[in-house]
Every structure is written in structure tokens, then in C-alpha cells.
Image (cartoon, rainbow, N blue to C red):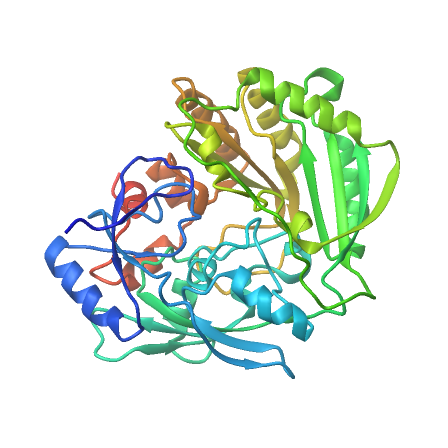
Amino acid sequence: MSLPTRLSWGRYPATPQAAHAAAWRDDVPALLQSLGKRYASTLPFGNGRSYGDSCYAESNHVIAMDGLNRFIEADWASGRIKAEAGVLLADVLSIAVPNGWFVPVTPGTKYVTLGGAIANDVHGKNHHVRGTFGRHVLSFGLSRSDKAAELVCSPTQNKALFAASIGGLGLTGIITWVEFQLMPIVSPAIDVTSYKFGSLAEFFTLSAELDPVHEYGVAWVDCLATGEAAGRGIYMVGDHARIGELEIKPSSKRSVPFVLPISAINNVTLRAFNSAYYAKQKAGKQQSRTDFEPFFYPLDGILHWNRIYGRRGFQQFQCVIPDHSAEPATRALLAAIARSGTGSFLAVLKRCGNIASPGLMSFPMAGTSLALDFPNNARLDRLLRELDVIVNEAGGRLYPAKDAHMRGEDFRSAYPQWHEVEALRDPLLCSQFWKRVTQS
């Protein structure tokens, strides 16, 4: 009987993963042993929202964790919650919001598992205030092939594995459950203030002024603008409303029903969208109140949106540039992207703070992050190499969770603590990403 298969969100590389389901936590040790012995390696696979090959097992046989989707404990007085690793952030929000709590850190999609949030140490629009998801993790269970019993990892128990697993890309063992701290709210609605800016210099001025006084901050940037308009965009800051109902309002969702034969993202559609979106925003300061979902998860309203990039899929490029070189390097990145005539509708520019993660290989640093998607085509490799050179010369790094092209030497330079993760890697766990960046 053939097994169901999984792909990463970028659908690239096109190497389907045979999914061996874990229905219960007790299934994990036997699955890990049997798959490791039969195929030499395996890897936990959450909800497939990593973009490249970090969620692909070297053997192409993964342990599907989405069946571990049960809540274990919830203390609504303290805001502590314990759930299995396959629970989605969407599931957490569905029970936390009505009780006056919110996830303290969320990436740009709510369809990530708790295990994946730890493995990739996800961050969001409030990194400058609350750091990464790993900072709010109290403990988790870790199943390893070389240990007879499940380990409890926390800042005080199995501390080395705790640090290596946060941002450790699922390589240190199978995370089976997670306990973490929620953030209190009065309302899930977000009070948003938007500012239209005409240049990259204005973005940095706005960020320096607004980030210190708001919980959330992020910018959309026109990735194809050139000349005096280069780096133009819309800066959005937000805070949870101080009055409102503790409820999740129902929202309609559309879906892309099939993978398009070719990408719908091209120079013509992208330029038209960017020009219209920028023109729609009024000059000056615009204030509004919105539900949390469109603010945090604008693309989640379209299910299977990755299909619009066609059969060849896409790659996301996300980098972070340290403060001392952020403005000139970001300017160079945007210029190279504009020359290429490609990119994505949602090009995201944001500042990261200096709050350290407990993880060894966490992506953010104090600096500026740029993220956008590129449809796969014959010219993309050349563009990515050009962008990589700019990032490396500026002392920046790429996000492993979004990567499908990083050179090994660049990874090892940017993440010098990879040796410590390798030393604690479970002997039966290995990803295509890890083999690519540590052995080439």
C-alpha cells in the first residue's frame, strides 16, 4: 500500500516525502526506531509550512506529526498551556482568545504546529518586544532513538538539548508535547496605524520612532520600485485593542483549487499590483481597527495560495542584516530584485530587536529582515547568488526554515553553533537541508 506524501510549502525541491503517521505519542519511539533502521534516517514533519528542504528527510521518509493534535492541560488563570506537538497555532487561538489570552509570538501563518514553531524558533511582528517563540517555551517532551524514555527539556532540565532543539530544525529528537506561556489580552482586535513612506530612508526613520512604542511593527515594500521611489512602501504598527469582545469572528476562506500550469506571478501582474496597492494608501497617518487574522495572517484567507506559483513552485528568500549595515545592504538587495523584475505581492520588511533567544541557531538578530517569494525559473539561481553575496558581505544570514539554496560555507559562517547542534543530533534524524549545508 502506497503511503501519502508531503511537500514543503514552496513545493521545491520537488521531492515528495513518504509520510508515516504517528497517531499517539506512544507511537513515536517505535516509528523512529523502525524508520531509522529501515531507511537510515527520518525526520518529523509538521504541517509543511517550511518553504524549502529543512522539513525533508534525507531518506524521503518522514514521521507525520499532525495526528498528535490534542490539548493536555490549560490553566486560564496563569495562561499556561500544554499540548501535543501537532497542535496548530490556529487551534491554540481558538481556545485561548475566548479566555483572554493570545500567542505571545506568531509568524505570518497560524497553520504551523507547536513542534514546528520550536524547531524553527519562529518570530513575528513583535520580535523587538518579545523575541522569538522559544523565549516563551516552558518545557517540552523529546523522544530520542538513543534514550529508552522520553526526556523532559526545559531551562533547568536537559538544558543542552533544550537550547539545541529551539531552532534545531527537528534534528535533536522528536518533540511530542509543548508547554508554553500565553500573553494576556483584553481584545484580539488590533488598533493599526499605517504610514505611507516614499523611500527606504523613511522606513528606517519610522521604525526608529514607532517600534519602541508599539507591540507590533511591519512594512510592506514595493520590491520593483526604482529611482527615487526605490524602497517605498507602507509601514504598519499595531497594538491589541483595550476594549472589545473576546471572540474569534467567523471569516470566509477562498481556495486555489489546483496547481496552476505556470506561475501567475510575473513582471506584469506584480508591477500592476504593487502600483495599485501603494496608490490606494492615503498619504499621512491612517488609523483603523481590524480583526487579528488579517493583520497577522493576510495570506491565510486564501487556502493553498502556494499553488498560484505553478508546477515549478517557488522559493522564499528571507534574510536579516545587522544594524550597522542594514540600510545600505537592504538598498542593494531591493535594487537587485527590482532589476530582476521578479518578486512577490507580499514583500515584508521589518526590524528585529536585540532580545536573545535561548536557542543555539535562532535566525533573528538586531537588524532588518527582508522576506519575499520568487517563482522558480531559469534566472532565479543567478539572482539568489547575487542576493547572497550582499547578505554575506553585510554580516547577515538567511533563515533555514525558508531556504532551498543556501551554500554550506555561508550557513556554517552565519550559524557557528551548528557544531553544538550536530553533536546533539539524534543519530537517526537527518534532513536534506542539514546534509546540504554541513557536508558541502
Relative side of 331 to 437, left or right: right
Residue 69 drawn at (x, y percent)? 42, 67
Q: Is residue 289 at least partly visible in the picture?
A: yes
- Front-most of residues 200 and 184: 184
Q: Is residue 43 above or below residue 71?
A: above
Q: Quadrant of residue 326?
A: top right
Q: Residue at x 11, y 57 (%)?
A: 38
Marks counted in the figure total: 0
- Front-most of residues 312 and 127: 312
Relative side of 205 to 11, left or right: right
Q: Is residue 197 above or below residue 77?
A: above
Q: Quadrant of residue 43?
A: bottom left
Q: Residue at x 65, y 56 (%)?
A: 250
Residue 391 drawn at (x, y percent)? 52, 34
Q: Residue at x 28, y 49 (%)?
A: 431
Residue 137 drawn at (x, y percent)? 51, 70
Q: Is residue 313 above or below residue 420?
A: above
Q: Residue at x 56, y 59 (%)?
A: 132
